[in-house]
Image (cartoon, rainbow, N blue to C red):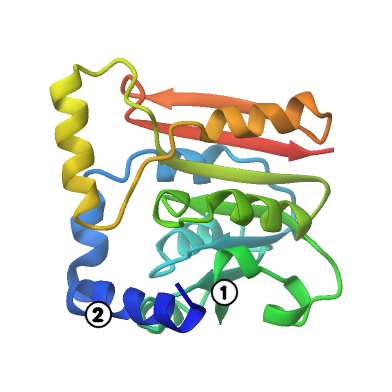
């Protein structure tokens, strides 16, 4: 799929539902507020949310620490229209696997923190997106991820039902996401702190780049 086709797919998906998006996602995109409240931050940090959507998380980050310099990247122009109304971050249109601090935001330095909130399960090249995020992150910086988990402790019928429903929205949980980051930890490129929510319904992963 070309970049243009990806952008068009995002518009077809989100434009009809943008008015109710935040309200309808709150019940099942669990762990977002927990991540925002607990992820490592320092005063004046450059923080980028990749797949920022309506800017909901960026607004909460601004409330947690008004000194943060906030940036958001999203593949949906419709989502960015809504995010701009919050006036809390510098925004850019683009793909996660192409994240570039200078090209997208004119920055000469890497980010201190990068957030991926329920984005990787919608990105076919999720490995490339993680690699690009880490390349845009300073040494000692943090990649903070919240997304669907493997539902390991769920009965099989419930797991299949959840995933069938999620697939209607082009969402496909990445079962080996934590394992992928653990291999990076084993390769001494960083340190992983992982937590699961509701028997693996969701997961929070904090990866500190070496």
SS at circle 1: loop
| 129 sits left or right of 109 in the view | left
Count up the numbered dots. Answer: 2
Residue drawn at x 62%, y 36% is 206
Disc 1 residue crowd, few under 14, some 14–19, many 20+, Cα 10 Å: many
Residue 83: horizontal and vertical position, in percent?
42, 76
Residue 27: horizontal and vertical position, in percent?
21, 45
Residue drawn at x 13%, y 23% is 157
SS at circle 2: helix
Q: Nearer the viewer, residue 13 or 67?
A: 13
What separation in Å lies between label 1 and label 2 (alpha carbons)?
Answer: 21 Å
Disc 2 residue crowd, few under 14, some 14–19, many 20+, Cα 10 Å: some
Residue 204: horizontal and vertical position, in percent?
50, 34
| 55 sits left or right of 151 in the view | right
Q: Is residue 132 visible?
A: yes
Q: Is residue 180 above or below residue 133?
A: above
Which labelled disc corresponds to residue 89? 1
Q: Nearer the viewer, residue 41 or 189?
A: 189
First-in-chain label (1 vs 2): 2
| 207 sits left or right of 122 in the view | right
Q: Is residue 95 above or below residue 22?
A: below
Q: Is residue 200 above or below residue 207?
A: above
Toward which corner of the image does residue 19 lie, by quadrant?
Answer: bottom left
Residue drawn at x 43%, y 39% is 174
Q: Are marks 1 and 2 in contact (CB under 8 Å)?
A: no
| 102 sits left or right of 176 in the view | right
**What residue would you read off at disc 2?**
15
Name the image quarter holding the C terminus. Answer: top right
Residue drawn at x 27%, y 73% is 14
Toward which corner of the image does residue 148 lie, by quadrant?
Answer: top left
Q: Is residue 76 visible?
A: no
Q: Nearer the viewer, mark 1 or mark 2?
A: 2
């Amino acid at each position: 799929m070309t970049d243009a086709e990806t952008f068009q797919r995002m518009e077809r998906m989100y434009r009809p539902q943008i008015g109710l998006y935040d309200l309808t996602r709150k019940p099942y995109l669990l762990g977002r507020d927990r991540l925002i409240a607990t992820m490592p931050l320092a005063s004046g940090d450059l923080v980028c949310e990749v797949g920022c959507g309506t800017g909901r998380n960026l607004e909460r980050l601004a409330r947690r620490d008004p000194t943060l310099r906030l940036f958001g990247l999203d593949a949906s122009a419709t989502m960015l229209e809504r995010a701009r109304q919050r006036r809390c971050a510098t925004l850019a249109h683009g793909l996660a696997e192409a994240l570039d601090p200078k090209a997208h935001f004119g920055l000469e330095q890497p980010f201190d923190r990068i957030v991926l909130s329920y984005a990787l399960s919608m990105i076919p090249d999720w490995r490339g997106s993680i690699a690009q995020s880490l390349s845009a992150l300073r040494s000692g910086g943090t990649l903070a991820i919240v997304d669907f988990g493997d539902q390991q402790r769920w009965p099989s019928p419930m797991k299949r039902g959840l995933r069938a429903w999620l697939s209607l929205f082009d969402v496909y949980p990445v079962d080996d996401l934590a394992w992928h980051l653990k291999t990076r930890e084993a390769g001494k490129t960083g340190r992983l702190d992982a937590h699961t929510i509701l028997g693996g319904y969701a997961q929070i992963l904090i990866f500190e780049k070496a």
